[in-house]
Amino acid sequence: MAERGEADVQQLVAALETSRAQLTALVRQEEILRVSLEEYGRARETMARYAEAPVGTEVLVPIGADSFLFAHVADVEKCIVGIGANVALEDSLEKAMGRIDRRMEQLQSVQEDVVQRIGEMEERVNAYTATIQQEYERLQRGAPAEERGEEGV
């Protein structure tokens, strides 16, 4: 391995910090994807259970934050579903569940990619850390004082 000076080590430290920032961003992205998948899963499960209930049955409808509303099943064939940009439409329950299933598949694929990138970034961070530690120890151990910037003060 070629000898590196302090400037090279500083460049490695800058690259390490950039990689750590990228890793943090990827971890946040994966968390958002996980939460989204959980939300879609709850919506899918609610729709499936609602579809099984006889008309007129009293049900609890989850509204978020561990809160529920009492309701009566009126129509197990239709629902209102968001399609993006704060737009919702009436659709069959079956089509809405299919839309949710497809969206969950897309999110799972993206999540798998992000998890893979997290692993790659962790390896990069670990490699930078090991290299920096080795170079720092080398500079402390064997580099003449002039290389470490300690003379001429």
Image (cartoon, grey):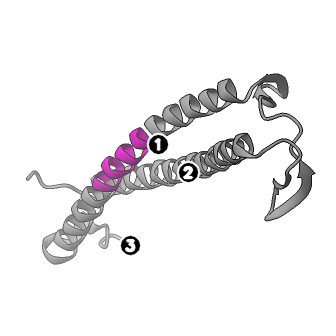
**Residue with the mark numbered 2:** 34
Q: Estimate how packed mark 3 is, as few (under 14), some (14 to 19) or many (20 or more) residues with alpha carbons within 10 Å.
A: few
Q: Would you say 104 lies left or right of 152 here?
A: right
Q: Mark 2 or 3 closer to N-term?
A: 2
The stretch of residues the image draws in magenta is 111-124
Q: Quadrant of residue 69?
A: bottom right
Q: Which residue is mark 3?
A: 153
Q: Amino acid at mark 2?
A: Arg
In three-dimensional space, the C-alpha distance between marks 1 and 2, rounded to whole angstroms, equals 8 Å
Label pair 1/2, CB-CB below 8 angstroms: yes
Quadrant in which residue 84 is drawn: top right
Position of residue 83 relative to residue 20, above or below, is: above
Question: Looking at this view, is 64 or 30 the one in front?
Answer: 64
Q: Which residue is mark 1?
A: 111
Front-most of 94 and 123?
A: 94
Q: Secondary structure at mark 2?
A: helix
Q: Nearer the viewer, mark 1 or mark 3?
A: 1
Looking at the picture, tell me which residue is in the foreground, 70 or 64. Answer: 70
Q: Percent from the top left, x then y, of residue 2?
A: 10, 51
Q: Please tell me which residue is depicted at 84% across the width and 24% down the height of the picture.
A: 87
Q: Mark 1 and mark 3: span between their CA atoms?
A: 54 Å
Q: Nearer the viewer, residue 26 or 138?
A: 26
Q: Tell me which amino acid carries mark 3.
A: Val
Residue plotted at (84% across, 28% down): 86
